Amino acid sequence: DQQVKQNSPSLSVQEGRISILNCDYTNSMFDYFLWYKKYPAEGPTFLISISSIKDKNEDGRFTVFLNKSAKHLSLHIVPSQPGDSAVYFCAAMPSGTYKYIFGTGTRLKVLA
Amino acid sequence: NAGVTQTPKFRVLKTGQSMTLLCAQDMNHEYMYWYRQDPGMGLRLIHYSVGEGTTAKGEVPDGYNVSRLKKQNFLLGLESAAPSQTSVYFCASSQDRSQPQHFGDGTRLSIL
């Protein structure tokens, strides 16, 4: 049973436009969410996080939105750049645990 | 600034052989994690540790053992390798549960 789902395996966006990556979850006990970016042959690198007490967090070109009623998380990248081309994973941690549960990833391709 | 270092980067084993993957972090982090990444499956937690001398099972622990004798090191052992353990293995560390995890660059393991 996949508790964290990224239903779009891939996404292509034109350079300069907005990229929106989505993540759905089933467990209402998740209290912390993160997005990671992964390039080939490298480990995932942390991008941005959000606590369940917030609904938005911004860091430069990256914004994460949390809709708790819909159990939905999204990452917005504006403007998108070719260097943003990578696989993006969302992850969620249930309250009271030490374990993140990862989604299956979305491959973003930003076209120049 | 090394961060999280995984050794080795690549390895090919025969079924039934044993080996140990080493993870070392220089950030004085308390928490350490071992994941495996398989196509279409995202990152799945094998074992984790919340401090020196402690270990706990993750989502897919069968066939693996771990040890955390020193705070900076987290070892993952395969006692009798099986083809189903062919994967890319990632180690990660974090200071506490709500802090982002820092990942190594992975160990690509093939079992024939």
Image: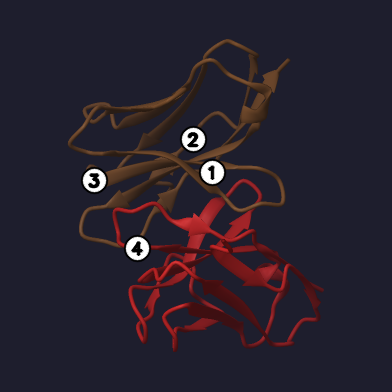
Chain colours: A brown, B red
Q: Vertically, is A17 above or below A40? A: above
Give the image quarter of residue B28.
bottom left
Q: Which mark's residue is nearer the viewer, 3 or 1?
A: 3
Q: Secondary structure at mark 2?
A: loop
Residue sitting at x 35%, y 83%: B54
User: Is there a contact, CB below 8 Å, between mark 2 and mark 1?
Assistant: yes
Chain containing mark 1: A
How busy is the neighbourhood of tag 3: few (under 14 within 10 Å), some, or many (20 plus)? some
Q: Which mark's residue is nearer the viewer, 3 or 2?
A: 3
Which residue lies most toward the left here? Answer: A53
Cα gap from disc 2 to disc 1, whole angstroms: 6 Å
- Tell me the residue that label 2 is attached to: A6
- Tell me the residue that label 3 is attached to: A31
Q: Vertically, is B83 above or below A31? A: below
Cα gap from disc 3 to disc 2, whole angstroms: 18 Å
Q: Amino acid at mark 2?
A: Gln
Chain containing mark 3: A
User: Is there a contact, CB below 8 Å, between mark 3 and mark 1?
Assistant: no
Cα gap from disc 2 to disc 4, whole angstroms: 27 Å
Viewer-closest of B40 and B55: B55
Q: Amino acid at mark 1?
A: Thr
Viewer-closest of B64 and B90: B90
User: Is there a contact, CB below 8 Å, between mark 1 and mark 4?
Assistant: no
- Tell me the residue that label 1 is attached to: A104
Residue A27 lies, in percent from the top left, at 28, 44
How busy is the neighbourhood of tag 4: few (under 14 within 10 Å), some, or many (20 plus)? some
Q: Secondary structure at mark 1?
A: loop
Q: Amino acid at mark 3?
A: Asp
- Tell me the residue that label 4 is attached to: B95
Which of the two discs, 3 and 2, labels the residue nearer the N terminus?
A: 2
Q: Vertically, is B71 above or below B83? A: below
Which residue lies most toward the front here? Answer: B1
